[in-house]
Amino acid sequence: MKLIVPMAGRGTRVRPHSHVTPKPLLHVKGRSVVERIVDLFARVLPEVPDEGVFVLGPDFGEGIRDQLRDICERHNMTARFAVQHTAEGTAHAVGAADEHLTGQGVVVFADTLFDMDETVDVGDADVIAWVKHVDDPRRFGIAVRDGERVTKLIEKPEDPVSNEALIGIYYVKDLADLHDEINYLIEHDVRGKGGEFQLTDAMDRLLQAGKVFKTAGVSAWMDCGTIPALLETTGKMLDRESDDLHHGTVTDSVIHDPVYIGPGATVKGSVVGPHVSIEAGAEVTGSILRDSIVFSEGRVKQSVLRDSIVGRHALAEGTARVVNIGDHSEMVH
């Protein structure tokens, strides 16, 4: 079982935090989005993935590959890598992993966090698409039904005929079939929304070819694709995982849980919380924080922050405002 994770995107909506770290490797309460996804599928799939295939951008360095190798090693998986040299859509991204598209696997885009209550029953399905009912499906691909049977998949419809959004997670019994349909789109220059090669279109070709297509639901679906969404999702994860919060050192401080204090993190003479994540090795001194994230090795001194993010190895000192400070940067007043 393979886990195919396209993650070559630039993460422009979470800049400056994605300048150095790809968005799927940003941490949400102590673990990266990618690791949380691997954790989940190791739990819910009938067969635990033994191979992780990560589609990276051409400028992603060896440090990023090392992080992904470490995640895979912790889950007894082998890490494989492919490169998407140009950004030409979701199908193009998956197609960049062409030599690895064999056997069964799950394709998952690491833009969101999600949860599932039960083990997935694959049964006789050739494809399982995870879906979520949304109020406005125009930003998503949708599944169209005739009764219980899925009849068509449409990418970002202007006039939606369904509120069942495709959330970018697919189980595929034979990845070679998907590979063939992606190749068809590219070889015949069949471009969809935005002039790009869309995975929804490749999946719809499988559906129209008669493959057994089923859907599955998620119990939670949380966006990590923008700064406000990352803050909101971090707050939700703190609420959901409130039994595993304090790992660092707290001195002369008041903590209004849920507050995550990562390994090696320190909080001194401060009032922190609720909904604050202080990642590993970070330091908060003489400050007041709420609804904020301090990434690993970040420092906050004599500041009052809310709805803020302080990047890795960054410093916020003497400030009282909403801030968004990138890695290795300083904001000192």
Image (cartoon, grey):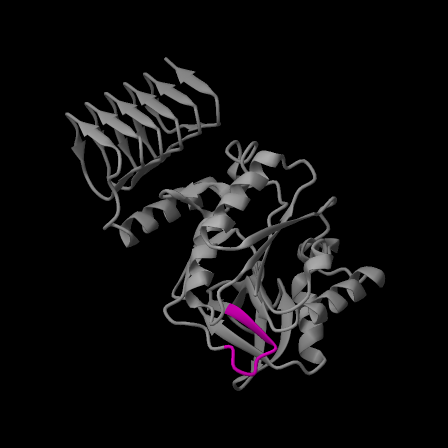
Drawn side of residue 106 relative to residue 240, left or right? right
Q: Quadrant of residue 324?
A: top left
Q: Residue furthest right?
A: 188
Q: Nearer the viewer, residue 276 or 34?
A: 34
Please indicate, yes or no, whether residue 233 appears anywhere in the rendered image. Answer: yes
- Rendered view: 141 above or below 273: below
Residue drawn 53% across the image and 86% down it: 147
Instruction: Classify the position of the N terminus by image quarter.
Output: bottom right
- Rendered view: 81 above or below 15: below
- Rendered view: 207 above or below 244: below
On the image, the x and y values in percent for residue 23 come to 53, 42
Residue drawn 46% across the image and 64% down it: 135
Q: Residue furthest top?
A: 333
Write down the region rendered in magenta: 122-130
Q: Nearer the viewer, residue 195 or 120?
A: 120
Drawn side of residue 190 relative to residue 133, left or right? right
Drawn side of residue 283 relative to residue 66, left or right? left
On the image, the x and y values in percent for residue 196 come to 73, 55
On the image, the x and y values in percent for residue 287 come to 25, 24
Please indicate, yes or no, whether residue 11 appears anywhere in the rendered image. Answer: no
Residue drawn 40% across the image and 28% down it: 323
On the image, the x and y values in percent for residue 290 come to 28, 35
Instruction: Classify the position of the C terminus by image quarter.
Output: top left
Residue drawn 80% across the image and 66% down it: 184
